Image: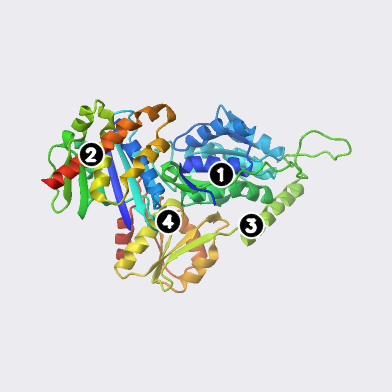
Amino acid sequence: MTQRVMMTGNNAVAEGAIASGCRYFCGYPITPQNDIPKYMAEHLPEVGGVFVQAESELASINMVYGAAATGAYVMTSSSSPGISLMQEGLSYMLGSELPCVVVNMVRGGPGLGNIGPAQSDYWLATRGAGHGDGRCLTFAPDSVQELHDWTFEAFGIAQKYRAPVMILGDALLAGMSEPVRLREHREPPPRDQEWAVGGLREGRQRRIVNSLWTDVEVMEELNQRIAARFSQARENEVRWEEYGADDAEIVLAAYGISARVCKTAIDDLAEDGIKARLIRPISLFPFPVEPFREWSERVSRIISVELSMGQLIEDVRLAVEGRCPVDLVGHSGGVMLTPDEVVCRTKELL
Amino acid sequence: MRERVFLAGIGGQGVDSAGSILAHMVLQQGFDVCNVSQFSPEVRGGWVSATVIIADGEVGSPIVGSADSLLLFSGRSVAHELHRAVPDGLIVVNSSLTGRVAAGQTRVIDVPATAIAAELGNEQVMNMVMLGAYVEVRGVLDPAGFGEALEAVLPARHHGHIPLNLKAVALGAQHVEQRRAQ
């Protein structure tokens, strides 16, 4: 077992990507994720990789498109306004059935916003990937270790479903330091995908990477393939964590940094004799419907605790289907929640 | 055990470095740890804080409303952060800059850290005087870990300053001992 080292969330993401075999990074600077490109610029060349600081987020995501078309493990990272700019490219990648990893260290918004921690890109991540009939497979780590592990895993998941995978963090997770047990580096896998382009070799059929299909039936077939892969993801990739009382009277729903706050709040509530349980979606799309369905029949209410004005709460309500009330406890615009506040608001709502 | 340490001061005082050095010591000594450093956009003169959580189980929330120990480096941090102190908590203040601090039931340790650092010839090691005093008075961590933590956190080009930093730690601890003796 390797020793644990102190690392920031940003560095753990970058190191997880390199360990996984990522050799191409194209990005454009924005706070609070700048340490990811900084780490990549420093360390990718050491393993024969390529780091490009592009002239914009649009250029970045389209460079990612190009590298992905060759079957390479490729990623970009940005923060909220930058991810908005990448939506078109994500849609084109989904339409061209190309895998990539995108990390969004969310900051306060909308607009240029600020550099405080926020979770207001939940919709952008789970409904996003631009226009058209698809979205990003989205995973939300809640610790520096998980940022490292999920970035490591994300490349394989993207290849499996031939789609962009988004890692959703926030300004706080990006900058905070925690002990991390680092993954061993593995070699980049061979680019032997049946769809990857890379020069027409003798005897090989021509391969086309494209998202323009003027024949509507061909386009529908593409959408059916994407939908089938998402159905498969619902079967295989749903992840969540539960924490707290087995006989809880109330459930808190939270992901990422808010879930960390809730874990302490649940411990504090227990000291006051209140039994609460956390359901923490790790995969945001596909969403863990099952635990919410099950718990909605056993508790008086569910509280969605999030750093937004109510985005996660919509998926919770869809899962609960009216079986119990679902309330919101949230902040937005870069304002952080504290465990004390979650405890107080939970007591008020109970 | 869960000890929430909140360090606050102004940009340039070494709050961020102190948080990192403390967090490394915590990890080396077998605890779990989380270190959140926050600062305003100014290069110098803005507010800076570090929240270091020491836990023998899961750390939980990296953000805390109140803290078991406060290390306040500047007058403004006293004005803004004193409310975080829990009743049976500990406050270590850099009394060179803050003057005397009254905080109800909370235990306050005045350390003239800037003056002590100046006597050593470098006011920049004020942060280590503060850490030395905190570790001595709290007794959770073994001060023998400072050397290794400084090596891990400081870039190699600054390793020549480690002996000076260790002296600052020792003087911080010594100040606390002298206070006890009185």
Give the residue at mark 3.
A233
Q: Position of residue B122 (x, y in %)?
A: 26, 26
- Position of A238 relative to A9 (above/below): below
- Give the Cα distance between marks 3 and 2: 57 Å
- Give the Cα distance between marks 4 and 3: 23 Å
Going 63% across and 60% down the picture, which residue do you hit? A236
The local crowd at label 2, few if under 14, some if 14 to 19, many if 20 or more residues have their Cα within 10 Å, is many
Between B48 and A204, the one lying in front of the other is B48
Which one is earlier in the sequence, the residue at label 1 or at label 4? 1
What's the residue type where badge 2 is placed?
Gly
Secondary-structure class at tag 2: helix
Residues at marks 1 and 4 on the same chain: yes
Which one is earlier in the sequence, the residue at label 3 or at label 1? 1
- Position of A255 relative to B17 (above/below): below
Between A176 and A281, the one lying in front of the other is A176
Question: Which chain letter goes with mark 4?
Answer: A
Which one is earlier in the sequence, the residue at label 4 or at label 3? 3
CB under 8 Å between callouts 4 and 3?
no
Secondary-structure class at tag 4: helix
- Position of A178 relative to A206 (above/below): below
What's the residue type where badge 3 is placed?
Ala
What's the residue type where badge 1 is placed?
Gly
- Give the Cα distance between marks 2 and 4: 38 Å
Give the residue at mark 4.
A259
Give the residue at mark 2.
B172
